[in-house]
Amino acid sequence: MNTSPPVPDPPDLSRGFLSRLAQLVGPENLRTDPADCWAYGYDNSRLHALPQAVVFATDADQIAGLVRLCAEAGVALVARGRGTGTTGATVPDRGGIVLSFERMQRIIRIAPEDRLAVVEPGVINEQLQDAIGALGFFWPPDPTSAASCTIGGNLAYNSAGPRAVKYGTPRENTLGLVAVDGRGERLRTGVLTTKGVVGYDLTRLIIGSEGTLALITEATLKLTPRPETKQTLRAAYADIHAAAAAVSAIMAQPIVPCALELMDAAAIDMVQRYAGLDLPHGVGALLMIEVDGPLACIDQASRAVSAAARNNGLLELRRAESREEVAALWKTRKALSPALRHIAPKKINEDVVVPVSQMGALIEGLEQLSRERGVRIVNFGHAGNGNIHVNLLTDPDDAEAFAQATACLDAVFQLVLELGGTLSGEHGVGIAKRDFVARELDAATLTLMADLKRQFDPKGILNPGKGFPQNSLP
Amino acid sequence: MNTSPPVPDPPDLSRGFLSRLAQLVGPENLRTDPADCWAYGYDNSRLHALPQAVVFATDADQIAGLVRLCAEAGVALVARGRGTGTTGATVPDRGGIVLSFERMQRIIRIAPEDRLAVVEPGVINEQLQDAIGALGFFWPPDPTSAASCTIGGNLAYNSAGPRAVKYGTPRENTLGLVAVDGRGERLRTGVLTTKGVVGYDLTRLIIGSEGTLALITEATLKLTPRPETKQTLRAAYADIHAAAAAVSAIMAQPIVPCALELMDAAAIDMVQRYAGLDLPHGVGALLMIEVDGPLACIDQASRAVSAAARNNGLLELRRAESREEVAALWKTRKALSPALRHIAPKKINEDVVVPVSQMGALIEGLEQLSRERGVRIVNFGHAGNGNIHVNLLTDPDDAEAFAQATACLDAVFQLVLELGGTLSGEHGVGIAKRDFVARELDAATLTLMADLKRQFDPKGILNPGKGFPQNSLP
């Protein structure tokens, strides 16, 4: 997908640099053998580049020293959680050092009385959820990869997941950060409280910046009390327009669901072929809806959402009455990922966003593109946010098919922007989408972003070339 | 309160500049007569400085032209809504032009199906609430001055109000901005959707920056559906520690109140002297609690919050059963502002924040300071956020008393920082608190903020000298 000119091979790291590096971090935290480094050069995007060295950070002082060393030597430094990203943002395509946070996974403190937790960036999302769950809390961001992705990675991409429709993204669930910028300066951003307006909001600026502005060494997360219970509904519609209208109606009434997931006709069709499913005849779109709240109110809440979900295009609305029925209703949605992996293991998976009112137009446009371009497109996603995972089923090993899919992707992005949308809701830009960014952001805004980057990282060593058009950042 | 060295008088605006200015904005949008300009030189902080000219902006192109003209001539440009701020942020203490947004008050569009409204910055908060209220929505930020303050001002300070405890501040309720930076460049930040991660988050960076980075010319606001109903509770406690423990307990269970307001013993005492009130004997702290939600669940919700509010220090918990009873319960709190105005019309009113668990320690520390320094201190505020309005009752016209209060304020800020808090939750820094900012933010972070400011505003014309220590920003 990356049409940028190839970047020349980086010069070898000098002996002097490597020996200072080993002295700084300790030989036990350094790998330079290509065989050891190989596994730190990929993420979930199928892109790969060999790091020249891998450093396992253990504390912020070490990271500050490492940054200063790299800045002095002009060596690129790429932060990495567990490599579950899908855009190549952690792939060291300009060589240099991959800084792995896997040894910084302490939960420093949990303060239930202040609804906050302070963590190191390498903590796995699920580890955090387990620790705070025991105290009656959760941290809303829940990417599909929660069992293996890190909090630092969630913050770097602003990764959200289905619960964002009710509880927001990391930007709405983080109080403050400690971070090291590209000059090796330690920054302390934000506050310990849910309000605070002293100074500029660097917390949100660093969140979502894909490791290009600063390396997060500690995060103060806002915790949310766990709701008592949850109810699951499945609504089947004749077509995508009826489903999109239902999403608008659901989001316009005051009971916000904690999940509002969409599958389009192509996704349903694929799953039905793969696994026999109990769906009404003529279904053209499916919504999975979850409502949470106090036990005594949950029926009322699910009735209110059900009422909003009803329109002329509704074919069937089912509510799970038991744990087994919950599993049965989710079966279609859960069958989707294995089906996709089975049919197109190397599909292109995007995560565009459009205003909720434009979801019908988006899916219709995607169907038309699919017909015109001969590329099978399967769509599902977080409908309450208008965040749709557009899957182009293709095989990168078939050059002709892949070129067709890539051209089609270009048209998909064009369509999304015409509908007032954005190219990424939670996967970020990385390498995969950087050549498209200038279509969404205007030149003045892009230039300013490059200017801001330069203040954090004057030598341009922090994840160089990621997130922005190749020629726009230092 | 401002102990900075006096700034020299600005040079008079040249004839050439004024004639270009008149040509650009039209004579009907320009005032230069000091008598006309006088009223645009104050805000609600008691600070005043005469602007050299006042411009009434009518559109973004005009503002871009104005910024370029000022940048070229090195003339300061201070954005102003309706002057309801309390920190002097809109007071042109270095002279120059006040840019009033009172003629940019169009609601450009309301899209209920996408839960958003696009507005000009001069729209009054209450006007917006009326327009979207008719469609079943509200915009959560609701400062006390909602009837007269502007959306642009709310964004400039990140002003929130009581509902923030459940619904967040402007940063959590704004999707995107159009703004003109200090070079006259038009920036478009954010998206039309609740998710979006392309580029850096300039939206939140500009929100809360007090007009020092860019002039907001249009804002896309996230709307929230109005809850069906609301219930009001009043909990009286023996002392502040019992009330603070109740706040922690309330915030740790899943029903988040839509208001959780505190009054301390000094505030209750003052109101009781001013107006006979129906409060239990020995009351040392009061919580006003509001819970909103669907009609069918509201009793359950208020029971859950009531259970959390109960502890050994609770003296009385009352729930309003009618509109009259709501008014009766709120009477104490509503009597506070007139009582304060009556007793100390020129009080120092701060809006510090501490972690909820530290509220007891804060109030106790303030009581001790009050005794030691002989300054009467009355506290109330948004307890769910730990956001306390600390009122030092003094008379600025009595030099000795005022010096005593100012010294005491210094100790108040010290206490807040020792408790892990922040100097401002929603009023901002402006002129009033700028000399204290360096105690909260470290030198590296402050230097970076100055560097970022320079990218937006290389000539330093946008609200110069506000929000930061005098010598730290260009």
Image (cartoon, coloured by chain):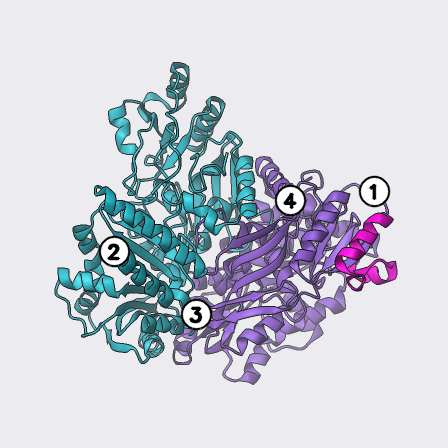
Chain colours: A purple, B cyan
Amino acid at pointer 1: Pro
Amino acid at pointer 2: Gly
Is residue B319 rendered magenta in the image?
no
Q: Secondary structure at mark 1?
A: loop
Q: Is residue B67 left or right of residue A467?
A: left
Disc 4: which residue: A437
Residue with the most extreme left position: B276
Separation of marks 4 and 1 at Cα, in angstroms: 23 Å
Disc 3: which residue: A305
- Tag in front: 4 or 3: 4
| Same chain letter for marks 4 and 1 | yes
Viewer-closest of B390 and A325: B390
Residue with the most extreme top position: B16
Disc 2: which residue: B374
Separation of marks 4 and 3 at Cα, in angstroms: 37 Å
Query: At which x and y percent is residue B311?
Result: 33, 79
Tell me where the magenta segment starts and ends, as one range: A15-43
Disc 1: which residue: A8
Q: Is residue B243 visible?
A: yes
User: Looking at the image, is mark 4 or mark 3 earlier in the sequence?
Assistant: 3
- Tag in front: 1 or 2: 2
Would you place residue B48 above or below residue A299 in this image? above
Circle 4: is it few (<14), some (14-19), or many (20+) Cα within 10 Å?
A: many
- Tag in front: 4 or 2: 2
Kindly identify which chain the residue marked by label 3 belongs to.
Answer: A
Query: At which x and y percent is residue B232?
Result: 27, 69
Query: At which x and y percent is residue A412?
Result: 65, 50
Separation of marks 3 and 1 at Cα, in angstroms: 55 Å
User: Looking at the image, is mark 4 or mark 1 earlier in the sequence?
Assistant: 1
> To which quarter of the image does residue B355 belong?
bottom left
